[in-house]
Image: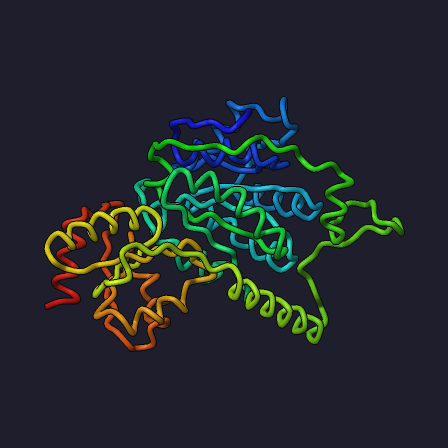
């Protein structure tokens, strides 16, 4: 399976990339609009080619705990779900973060709250970027805006997860999961041998340590002073990630008087709105956060000294806008525009929002 260009859905790209990046195991459960990830893996049958385990668990709770076990052994393991399913996984995600187990989680967001709708949404920003589960932890959060990035971020997500011993999540929305585009898939990589896994992850619970005593993977610590030390260490790690792993894209920002800040599918809508605005003499640029955590706080703060206003374009009632306002620290006007219920705005609506919220 050499590099090739294929037309496929974003969800399908996740599955194909997982096989080609040499993932050891996938544990999931069907839920719209991400079910094609599991379905595609079932069709690919990677257990016959690469040895990858693909398992439909009995529930989302079971799936995330299988990830905990597989990741704790040093293997590249992942899961995927959509918004209500990720809610069920939150306890397990917190345990994984507390045990510093690398893994990859995929959330293809749908509308809520509750069962809500199967239509696209970006309303899991708080759930993901603010932690979601209990305790002071962070997830490395990648927000793809194309089918190509859905594939690429599988590799990047695992790279960052193992680099920092921290769970990573691909936070996509239903538009990106279901849309079809050309994708350049990576070349097939070999899965690591057990010996290579032990060399890469000496902390892993493999039962094959030099002194034959198994490493214990746990998030439990009954001594308050030691638990405080653990948390302080976690916070220092998060500061390192914030210093080194911020990713974003800038388009026409050099001369911009107004800035659209958007991620995922809304960044695509925002880019077209930017073009329409410029045709009408309004100098608009777009800044797309690629990592929602770590958030591009510094660059947004710098633009606050250069532009007249910022519009947070989100498929929700206003979540990322809070982080933008914290970033600018009152230096410039920041407004939110979004649609709810799975309704995707058209670019003309965004241009009107700039005119009405920032210019008038």
Residue at the front extreme, as displayed: 254
Nearest the viewer among 250 and 194 is 250
The relative height of residue 1 versus residue 303 in the rendered view (above or below) is above
Q: In this view, does 56 lie to the left or right of 217?
A: left
Q: Residue 319's quadrant in the figure?
A: bottom left
The C terminus sits in image quarter: bottom left
Spot occupied by residue 222 in the image (x, y as percentages of width and height):
71, 68
Nearest the viewer among 348 and 103 is 348
The relative height of residue 148 versus residue 72 in the rendered view (above or below) is above
Q: In this view, does 281 lie to the left or right of 127?
A: left
Residue at the right extreme, as displayed: 211
The N terminus sits in image quarter: top right
Q: Is residue 164 left or right of residue 172?
A: right
Give the residue drawn at x 64%, y 53%.
101
**Residue 2 seen:** yes
**Residue 92 seen:** no
Spot occupied by residue 149 in the image (x, y as percentages of width and height):
43, 42
Give the residue drawn at x 42%, y 37%.
34
Spot occupied by residue 338 in the image (x, y as percentages of width and height):
24, 55
- Colouring mode (rainbow / by chain / secondary structure / one colour): rainbow
């Amino acid at each position: 399976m050499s590099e090739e260009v294929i037309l496929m859905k974003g969800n399908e790209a996740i599955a194909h990339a997982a096989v080609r990046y040499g993932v050891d195991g996938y544990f999931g459960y069907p839920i719209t609009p991400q079910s094609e990830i599991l379905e595609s893996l079932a069709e690919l049958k990677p257990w016959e080619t690469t040895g990858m385990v693909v398992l439909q668990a009995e529930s989302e709770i079971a799936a995330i705990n299988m990830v905990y076990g597989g990741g704790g052994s040093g293997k590249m393991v992942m899961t995927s779900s959509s918004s209500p399913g990720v809610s069920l996984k939150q306890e397990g995600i917190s345990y994984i973060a507390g045990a510093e187990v690398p893994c990859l989680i995929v959330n293809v967001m749908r509308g809520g709250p509750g069962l809500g709708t199967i239509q696209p949404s970006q309303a899991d920003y708080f759930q993901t970027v603010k932690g979601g589960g209990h305790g002071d932890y962070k997830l490395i959060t990648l927000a793809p805006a194309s089918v190509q990035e859905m594939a690429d971020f599988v590799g990047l997500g695992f790279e960052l997860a193992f680099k920092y011993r921290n769970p990573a999540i691909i936070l996509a929305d239903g538009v990106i999961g279901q849309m079809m585009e050309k994708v350049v898939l990576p070349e097939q990589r070999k899965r690591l041998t057990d010996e290579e896994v032990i060399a890469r992850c000496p902390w892993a619970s493999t039962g094959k340590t030099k002194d034959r005593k198994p490493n214990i993977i746990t998030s439990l610590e009954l001594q308050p002073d030691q638990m405080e030390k653990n948390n302080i260490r976690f916070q220092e790690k998060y500061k390192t990630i914030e210093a080194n792993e911020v990713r974003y894209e800038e388009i026409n920002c050099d001369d911009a008087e107004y800035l659209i800040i958007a991620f995922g599918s809304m960044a695509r809508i925002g880019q077209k709105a930017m073009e329409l605005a410029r045709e009408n003499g309004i100098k608009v640029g777009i800044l797309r956060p690629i990592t929602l955590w770590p958030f591009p706080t510094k660059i947004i703060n710098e633009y606050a000294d250069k532009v007249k206003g910022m519009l947070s374009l989100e498929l929700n009632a206003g979540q990322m806008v809070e982080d933008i306002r914290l970033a600018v620290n009152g230096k410039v006007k920041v407004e939110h525009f979004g649609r709810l219920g799975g309704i995707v705005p058209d670019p003309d609506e965004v241009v009107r929002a700039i005119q009405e919220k920032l210019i008038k």
